[in-house]
Image (cartoon, rainbow, N blue to C red):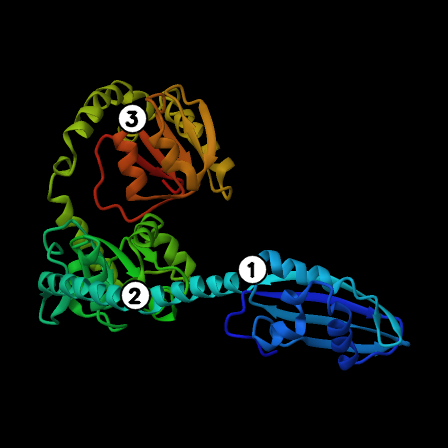
Amino acid sequence: MQNVDTTKYVIYADITAEGIVERPDVVGAIFGQTEGLLGSDLDLRDLQKTGRLGRIDVQITSSGGKSSGTISIPSSFDKVETAILAAALETIDRVGPCIARIAVNRIEDVRAAKRRYVIERAKRILVEMFDENILETEEITEEIKQSVRVEEITHLGKDNLPAGPNVLDSDAILVVEGRADVLNLLKYGIKNAVAVGGTNVPPTIADLCAKKVVTAFTDGDRGGELIIKELLQVADIDFVARAPEGKSVEDMTQKEIVRALRQKIPVEQVLDQYKIKNQPKKRREITTKRKSLIREKPFCVRNTAERAEAIAPRRVMPREVVPKVVPAPVPVIEEVIVAASEPVPEPEPQREWFRQHVDELDGTLCARIMDRNQNVLREVAVRDLARELKETNGDVNGVIFDGVVTQRILDIAADKGLEYLIGAKMGNIAKSPSCVKVLTKEA
């Protein structure tokens, strides 16, 4: 359809005819039956000659002896005159020899369509053209931050491993895969990470892991799994944290890093997961050396003043009931008084009271929180044990659970003044507080 340059509105109408008609018949009926209807000022032929009215476009088809189609007429008049022309079309009642009916469907404002185009195009211009300057500014800022982080990176040992500035001074470190991982952690203020540089773990990492609490933080792919298996064989790690599936540590955001580190799991669970039953001799020697080096430091050095105040009153109370719980002189009694039958059975009920709970909890992965009278306060899942202990208010005396006694559980128990922890087996304990007695079901 060819419209005039000054078109403001387009009249759209539907036409139906009781017979077969064609486009020239419809156009002739429009000019013929509206001639003189609206006066000389609105005569369609004169308006088309002067350019006030555009070309009349008719699309019509015939089927079953009847015809139907659409009519569109561009107009450069204002709203009132355009409405008059549209109403004049509906007065047409015959096209050629056939009875016909024309009904105006809608009148489109061409300027409104142009305004919509202007708005959409302006949005694209704003995003596509102005966004380049924004990205350039972000690149400058990122380049400055990158240079600062590179200056903070140090290199450890003869292997020149990329590491954060606080690796040597920190008690706990993160072992990651590469230099980019260390840079990303520095970006969010984590300065105690060291990179292994591949699946071949260098001796510097093994020596470092022997003296510190180590968390292996690897990518969520096959390479990260291989590095963990390598670390389990040549180094003494305590926890394992993984990036989300298919994601690298260097691409993680701060929230994702914090979430992954909070969800770290003890190394004992990883050994079971990968079906690694026995530790190599070299690993056992490193573990022994590491524990001896760490235990040379007093345990209270790591405690804060508040934790010392919270634990101090609890240390007096267990000493009053120690003769009741711990059968200390059993071997001596058996040697000195051979014929005495009553003193020997005394420790057996004390031993049986938790043996019964251990047997009942075997294989359930549950924990029983006990009071000072050896009664069960409540039973929870092992995965919720740490949270339950943190929420206790002093009424808990000990815990019996079907799980691994980890450093985290032990620290919480000492903080809450618990007297004993009885678990399925002992984990990798680096610092053992003297105020908490730790037993396993093999003991």
| Residue 333 badge | 3
- Asked which quadrant contains residue 32, the reply is bottom right
At a point 47% along the width and 31% down the height, the residue shown is: 379
Q: Which residue is mark 1?
A: 78
| Residue 338 badge | none
At a point 51% along the width and 41% down the height, the residue shown is: 364
At a point 34% along the width and 25% down the height, the residue shown is: 397
**Badge 2 vs badge 1, beta-carbon distance below 8 Å:** no
Distance in Å between CA atoms under marks 2 and 1: 41 Å
Seen from the viewer's position, the closer of residues 440 and 406 is 406
Residue 209, percent from left and from top? 19, 58
**Badge 3 vs badge 2, beta-carbon distance below 8 Å:** no
At a point 44% along the width and 27% down the height, the residue shown is: 353
Q: Which label lies toward us, 3 or 2?
A: 2
On-image quarter of the N terminus: bottom right
Mark count: 3
Q: What's under tag 3, amino acid-wise? A: Ile
Classify 10 Å Cα crowding around label 1: few (below 14), some (14-19), many (20 and above): few
Q: Which residue is mark 2?
A: 131
- Quick check: 18 left or right of 107? right
Q: What's under tag 1, amino acid-wise? A: Asp
Q: What's under tag 2, amino acid-wise? A: Asp
For mark 3, give the secondary structure. Answer: helix
Distance in Å between CA atoms under marks 1 and 3: 117 Å
Q: Earlier in the sequence, mark 1 or mark 3?
A: 1
For mark 1, give the secondary structure. Answer: loop
